[in-house]
Amino acid sequence: MARQTGCRSVLINPAVDPARDLARYIGEQTFWHQPEQRFYFEPHFVDELRAMAADGLCQPGPELALIAKGDEVLDWREMSARYAHAQLRVLEGGDHALSDFPAHLDEVLGFLDLV
């Protein structure tokens, strides 16, 4: 949506190619925070992700990317390369959830002109 409208956006540990990354999880899965609950990840979900890919379709508006080197799910180097045009904040350590997000809130709000 931000790319289609040219508005500012903040990307937090952004997935570079979610269709590629999630294709290996087709089938029955458990919820991350509730492993006793299960769901089925269907192949057509990957197709839907491919159809939504916005690569090169729109000129991005201003983007701030917060990328944690300690992300245990995504490769920080791939994220940094994909979003090299953005205002990058490559953070030492951290995790996929960016658990220290409150420490970055002032920068995020400032970038979005919300302060």
Image (spheres, rainbow, N blue to C red):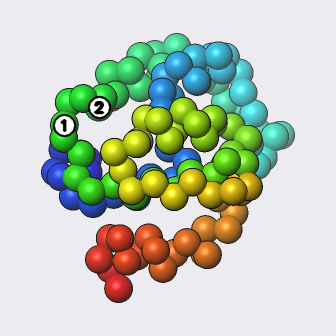
How far across and down, in percent of the image, does residue 55 sit? Answer: 30, 29
Q: How many marks?
A: 2
Q: Position of residue 98 (x, y in %)?
A: 64, 58
The type of residue carrying mark 1 is: Cys
Residue placed at 16% from the left, 51% from the top?
5
- Which quarter of the rendered picture does the C terminus lie within? bottom left
Q: Quadrant of residue 35?
A: top right
Residues 98 and 49: in front is 98
| 21 vs 102: above or below | above
**Which label is found at residue 58?**
1
Above/below status of 50 relative to 62:
above
Query: Please, what secondary structure does the residue beneath circle 1 have?
Result: loop
Of residues 2 and 32, the one nearer the viewer is 2
Against 101, residue 40 (above or below) is: above
Residue at 69% in and 63% down: 99
Q: Is residue 111 left or right of residue 94?
A: left
**Quadrant of the image occupied by residue 24:** top right
Q: In the rendering, at what x and y percent does residue 58 appear?
A: 19, 37
Q: Amino acid at mark 2?
A: Ala
Q: Is residue 58 left or right of residue 55?
A: left
Q: Is residue 34 visible?
A: yes
State the mark number for residue 54.
2
